[in-house]
């Protein structure tokens, strides 16, 4: 599609806000979206969709070279934001805890595992953002899945992915009872459960891409557009209902088909809104989703700053603190991008040739 798919930008923004509410309620003891962790699956699924888009567009014959190129591009797309977010989270820690210079230097060294990122390999460092495990799990999963998608073709999306999704989510939900696993080792292999969770979500996104491309030429009537809009609202409402009223239960498993239908309609532009709702400015909401995700949970360590008698007052203070770190990280991200552009050519000239 030549026009921007604004619905995906808005969904990413909604998912990030839901995760903020989840962490806020979890750390403050308020019953607010206690199952909001399931919205991370939405991000994994979206990643899987774009992975398959890259696979099908690639003209590179060498699968190894193509995989490394894809991983490099993916990492560089979020690296400046991640680095900025880690530094801002460290600054928050320095100010509140009044750390000494040697401690600050040691913390900067420990932050390497978060920036690279290596957390899903069990190397945690200081974990200032408290949420970057997601990026680590995603990158490891992409390293595994991208070359398989190139090698297997349709067999990957139509055979491997359905089996992987059913087995991984099935085992997690039956053995643990819910999807929210990150650093646990539950499958008797030395791989953290968060990586398996990322693999399953990306596989869902890969299947989603296959379905969207297979039906992209099918025209939808006005009645069909309205029905798809109803399906989008129903699926999003169901996911929020499970997150609010059935947290940490096997009902998490049923949100995966809901995510699939919701994102199929949005990526395929099947509903009356997604076919006509396209604005360039919504890209800022997509960008903001990563900023918000990486800069909201560092305050978990200092909940005494915002816990008050009422949830409304507590969240107002919390939101103000999060907004401050988001603005700081946004500014620092722009500075880092400008700095990189400035030194890129001299580095190539003097060290590459």
Image: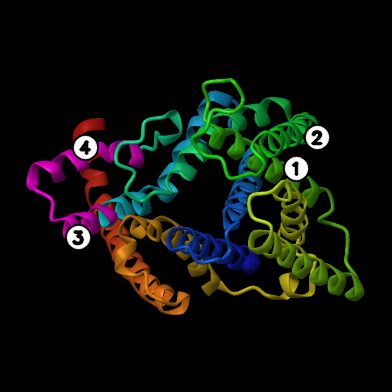
| Tag 4 residue | 109
Q: Quadrant of residue 118?
A: top left
Please say whether residue 60 is visible from this viewpoint. Answer: yes
Please say whether residue 1 is visible from this viewpoint. Answer: no
Residue 252: image tag? none
Q: Are marks 2 and 1 in contact (CB under 8 Å)?
A: yes
- 113 in the magenta segment: yes
Q: Is residue 113 above or below residue 188?
A: below
Q: CA distance from mark 4 to mark 3?
A: 20 Å
Taking depth in this image into account, of 21 and 304 the one nearest to the observer is: 304
| Tag 2 residue | 158
| Badge 4 element | helix
**Along the polypeptide, which appears first: circle 1 or circle 3?**
3
Pointer 1 local density, CA inside 10 Å: few below 14, some 14–19, many at least 20 = many
| Comparing labels 2 and 3, the label whose residue is closer to the camera | 3
Q: The N terminus lies in which quarter of the figure? A: bottom right
Q: Quadrant of residue 119?
A: top left
**Along the polypeptide, which appears first: circle 4 or circle 2?**
4
Q: Quadrant of residue 181?
A: top right
In this picture, which residue range is highlighted in magenta?
89-115
| Comparing labels 4 and 3, the label whose residue is closer to the camera | 3
| Comparing labels 4 and 2, the label whose residue is closer to the camera | 4
| Tag 3 residue | 96
Q: The C terminus lies in which quarter of the figure? A: top left
| Tag 1 residue | 207
| Badge 3 element | helix
């Amino acid at each position: 599609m030549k026009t921007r798919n604004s619905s995906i930008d808005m969904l990413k923004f909604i998912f990030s806000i839901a995760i903020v509410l989840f962490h806020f309620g979890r750390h403050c003891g308020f019953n607010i979206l206690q199952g909001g962790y399931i919205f991370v699956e939405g991000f994994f699924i979206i990643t899987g969709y774009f992975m398959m888009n890259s696979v099908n567009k690639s003209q590179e014959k060498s699968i190894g070279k193509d995989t490394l190129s894809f991983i490099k591009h993916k990492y560089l797309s979020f690296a400046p934001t991640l680095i900025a977010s880690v530094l801002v989270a460290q600054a928050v820690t320095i100010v509140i805890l009044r750390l000494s210079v040697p401690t600050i230097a040691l913390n900067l060294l420990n932050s390497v595992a978060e920036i690279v990122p290596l957390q899903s390999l069990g190397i945690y460092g200081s974990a200032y953002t408290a949420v970057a495990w997601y990026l680590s799990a995603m990158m490891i999963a992409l390293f595994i899945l991208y070359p398989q998608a190139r090698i297997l073709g349709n067999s990957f999306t139509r055979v491997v992915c359905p089996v992987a999704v059913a087995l991984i989510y099935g085992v997690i939900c039956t053995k643990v009872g819910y999807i929210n696993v990150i650093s646990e080792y539950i499958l008797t292999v030395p791989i953290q459960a968060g990586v398996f969770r990322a693999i399953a979500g990306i596989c869902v996104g890969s299947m989603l891409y296959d379905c969207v491309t297979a039906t992209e030429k099918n025209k939808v009537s006005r009645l069909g557009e309205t029905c798809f809009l109803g399906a989008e609202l129903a699926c999003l409402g169901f996911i929020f209902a499970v997150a609010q009223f059935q947290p940490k239960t096997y009902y998490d498993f049923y949100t995966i088909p809901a995510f699939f239908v919701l994102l199929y309609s949005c990526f395929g532009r099947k509903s009356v809104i997604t076919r006509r709702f396209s604005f360039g400015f919504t890209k800022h909401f997509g960008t903001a989703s990563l900023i918000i995700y990486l800069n909201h949970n560092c305050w978990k360590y200092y909940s005494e700053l915002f816990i008050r008698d009422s949830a409304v007052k507590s969240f107002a203070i919390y939101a103000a603190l999060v907004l401050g770190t988001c603005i700081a990280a946004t500014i620092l991200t722009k500075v880092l991008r400008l700095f990189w552009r400035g030194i890129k050519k001299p580095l190539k000239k003097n060290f590459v040739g």
